[in-house]
Image: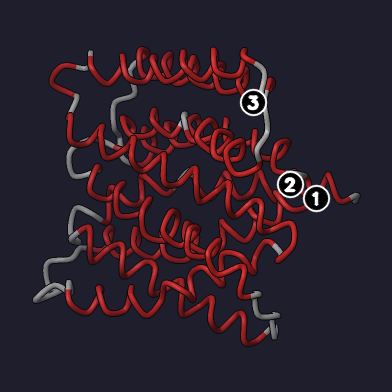
Amino acid sequence: MDVKTSGWINGFLGVLIFSGSLPATRVAVADFDPVFLTAARASIAGIMALVLLAALRAKRPERSDLSSLAIIAAGVVVGFPLLTALALQHITSAHSIVFIGLLPLATAIFAVVRGGERPAPSFWLFAGFGAALVAGFALTRGAEASPVGDSLMIAAVIVCGLGYAEGGKLSRRLGGWQVICWSLTLALPLMLLIGWVARPATLAGVGGPAWLGLAYISLFSMLIGFIFWYRGLAEGGVAAVGQLQLLQPFFGLALAASLLHEPVGWSMAAVTLAVVVCVAGAKRFA
């Protein structure tokens, strides 16, 4: 198997794992406080990352890498999990997944900013139209819409896009699994402290589904998925493998409908498809 094929396979597995993140978070946040949930998932994944780094005797990052690792930690370890957990108190996971359709676009924009690339004007045309579609959808949902939930999801997409772009760039030199492991390790002391302060008075009311949701987002969404994802980006290229994110909304909607029995109307699916088309066009000209 050549390196590019391996990159596509690893990237696909990463996207498949990430697709379960929002439904699992929706289940977990029903019984856990969002701040505690964010700290708990990052702490569990951080401890496992620390063990993995020690077991494999990973090379320490350079001092110049610390700023990039801090950006990644702020974006994908803290920012995205916390903002989505807060948002899912106001909206369904199916509704939130429509916003995930903008994540590849956000990643591409930050890759342009960080890399100094000069995309064609058509890139910004697709980008603007895709953003307008999502904004219009959020504003016309009536009773289903939540200004707070929608705003939190937009913020989550922005910080996650920055974390993906920064991680994709750094993984070319530091290595895919090392990037997420060092980012988790960097954030671990703060996450342990926040988790202790925000811990619930009792866990008696936490049901089995919430525990399963926490286990999934801690082990798979926060660590294992990123190992596949960043390795895929490193092997197959950020621009190419990054397009696999376009599949994530469809996988996520299918999970929300089948596991959580959430309604997925034709309009939600149509907007998601339209956003995917816009993102694909934007990526084509980036």
Question: Which disc is residue 6 wearing?
Answer: 1
Horizontal side of residue 7 vs 191, given as left or right: right
Crowd tier of the residue under label 1, counting other residues whose Cα lies within 10 Å: few below 14, some 14–19, many 20 or above: some
Q: Amino acid at mark 3?
A: Lys
| Tag 2: amino acid | Ile
Q: CA distance from mark 1 to mark 3?
A: 21 Å
Nearer to me, 118 or 244:
118
Residue 184 x %, y %: 48, 70
Mark 3 is surrounded, within 10 Å at the Cα level, by few (under 14), some (14 to 19) or many (20 or more) other residues, namely: many
Instruction: Examine the image and state in which quarter residue 149 appears.
Output: top left
Are the residues flagged by discs 1 and 2 in contact, CB closer than 8 Å? yes
Give the quarter of the image for residue 44: bottom left
Which numbered disc flags the more N-terminal residue, 1 or 3? 1
Whether pointer 3 and pointer 2 mark residues with C-beta atoms closer than 8 Å, the reply is: no
Q: Is residue 210 left or right of residue 1?
A: left
Residue depicted at 19% across the width and 25% down the height? 145
Q: Which residue is at the far left?
A: 201
Task: Report which residue position mark 2 lands on.
Answer: 9
Residue at disc 3, secondary structure: helix
Asked which secondary structure carries label 1, the reply is: helix
The picture places residue 221, in percent across and down from the top left corner, at 47, 56
Looking at the picture, tell me which residue is in the foreground, 129 or 97. 129
| Residue located at (28% from left, 47% from top) | 26
Where is mark 3, residue-wise?
283
Mark 2 lies on a secondary structure that is helix
Out of 269 and 72, give the one closest to the viewer.
72
User: Between marks 3 and 2, how big is the CA–CA gap?
Assistant: 20 Å
Measured as percent of width and height from the top left, residue 174 is found at 70, 66
Residue 116, by quadrant, is top right
Q: Is residue 131 above or below residue 4?
A: above
Q: Quadrant of the C terminus?
A: top right
Name which residue type carries label 1. Ser
